[in-house]
Amino acid sequence: MEAISMLVSAAAEKDPNTTGSGLTALGAGLAYGFAAIGPALGIGNLVGKSVEAMARQPEAAGMVRTTMFLGIAFTEALALIGFVVFILLKFA
């Protein structure tokens, strides 16, 4: 965080009018980075538990697999929403 504040202050000394766009880009990148962490953890947990369930009850593997893919799709939608917010912050 200290490095980011040093970059912002250096940019402000060079040209005070350019810090707004730099901070916008930095905020947009951080927003998408944080928005991608949750779905990544969710998908990893979901797939791990699904594989565990399939290993415990192989006869229910088809139903577990279908439910897993639905869960992955819904969880991935959160990452796409984060990407849309990133684009809105970057270009708005």
Image (spheres, grey):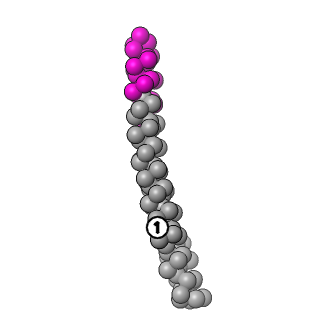
Q: Is residue 45 above or below residue 80?
A: above
Whether residue 37 appears in magenta in the rendering, the answer is no
Q: Count of labels shown?
A: 1
Residue at the spot 43% in from the left edge and 12% down from the top edge: 58
Counting from the top left corner in percent of width and height, residue 86 is at 48, 61
Q: Is residue 59 above or below residue 41?
A: above
Is residue 10 placed above or below 30 in the rendered structure? below
- Residue under the point 44% across and 36% down: 72
**Whether residue 62 is situated above or below residue 76 in the rendered picture:** above
The location of residue 31, given as percent across then percent down, is: 45, 61
Q: Is residue 41 visible?
A: no
Closest to the observer: 32 or 81?
81
Q: Is residue 81 visible?
A: yes
Magenta residue span = 45-67
Amino acid at pointer 1: Leu
Q: Which residue is mark 1?
A: 89
Residue occupying image coordinates x 40% and y 34%: 71
For mark 1, does the 10 Å Cα neighbourhood hold few (<14), some (14 to 19), or many (20 or more) residues?
A: some
Q: Secondary structure beneath disc 1?
A: helix
The x, y position of residue 82, in whole percent, is 44, 55
The answer to whether residue 61 is magenta is yes
Of the pair 6 and 25, the residue shown nearer to us: 25
